[in-house]
Image (cartoon, grey):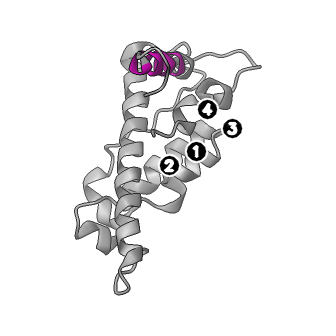
Amino acid sequence: MAGNNGNGDLAFTAELFKAADKLRGNLEPSEYKHVALGLIFLKYISDAFEAQRAKLAADEYADPEDPEEYLAESVFWVPKEARWSFLQGNAKRPEIGKLIDEAMEAIEKAPSNEGLKGVLPKNRPTEELCPSDPQQDDARRVDRPVLQHRHA
C-alpha cells in the first residue's frame, strides 16, 4: 500500500480524482464518462493482450504476432499502435488524444476484433466539447498520472 498512515487507497483515490479532473477539463460528466471508460477498456484489453503475448512467447510453437493465437484464447488482438505501452510512451505528445482515437480505430479494424467495430469511443475532447485556452493542449490536459501509473 502506498502511504505510511494506512490510508494508501485513499491517497491513491485522491490522485486518481485529480487526474480525472485534469482529463475532464470543461467536459460535462455525461460526456467525460465515454472518454474515461474508453481508456479503462483500452488498458484492460492491452493488459490481457500482453499477458497472452508473454505466454505465446514462451511457447516455441506459438506465434505471438498471429492474431488468431489470441482469438483462440478469447483475447482481443491489440495492434502495436494501440498498445498501452505505446500510448504511455507518447503521453507527453500534444496529439495524445488523436493517438488514443487512432488506437481505438486500429483495434476495431483488426480482423479478429469484428465484434468491436463501431463500438469503441473515439471522442477525445475537442474545441467544440472542451474549449481550452491556446496554452492548453491534449498532452497537458491528459498529463501523465493516468497513462503513466503502473500498479504495483
Q: Is residue 130 above or below residue 54?
A: above
* Eye-nearest disc, 4 or 3: 4
Sooner in the amino-acid sequence: mark 4 or mark 1: 1
Q: Which mark is residue 144?
A: 4
Q: Going 67% across and 26% down the picture, which residue do you hit?
A: 140
The 10 Å Cα crowd at callout 2, few under 14, some 14 to 19, many 20 or more, is many
Q: Amino acid at mark 2?
A: Trp
Give the alpha-carbon distance from disc 4 to disc 3, as whole Å. Answer: 7 Å
For the N terminus, the quadrant is: top left
Q: Amino acid at mark 3?
A: Lys
Q: Residue at x 36, y 45 (%)?
A: 44
Label 4: how many residues lie within 10 Å, few (<14), some (14-19) or many (20+)? some
Residue pointed to by mark 2: 84
Q: Is residue 71 rendered magenta in the image? A: no
- Can you tell which mark lies on residue 88? 1
x, y percentage for residue 9? 39, 21
Q: Earlier in the sequence, mark 3 or mark 2?
A: 2
Check disc 4 and give the amino acid type: Arg
Q: Residues within 10 Å of mark 1 (few under 14, many from 20)?
A: some
Q: Position of residue 130 (x, y in %)?
A: 56, 18
Q: Main secondary structure of the magenta part?
A: helix
> Hey, what amino acid is under mark 1?
Gln
Q: Of helix, strand and loop, which one carries label 1?
A: helix
Return the residue nearer the eye: 60 or 5: 5
The C terminus sits in image quarter: top left
Residue pointed to by mark 3: 92
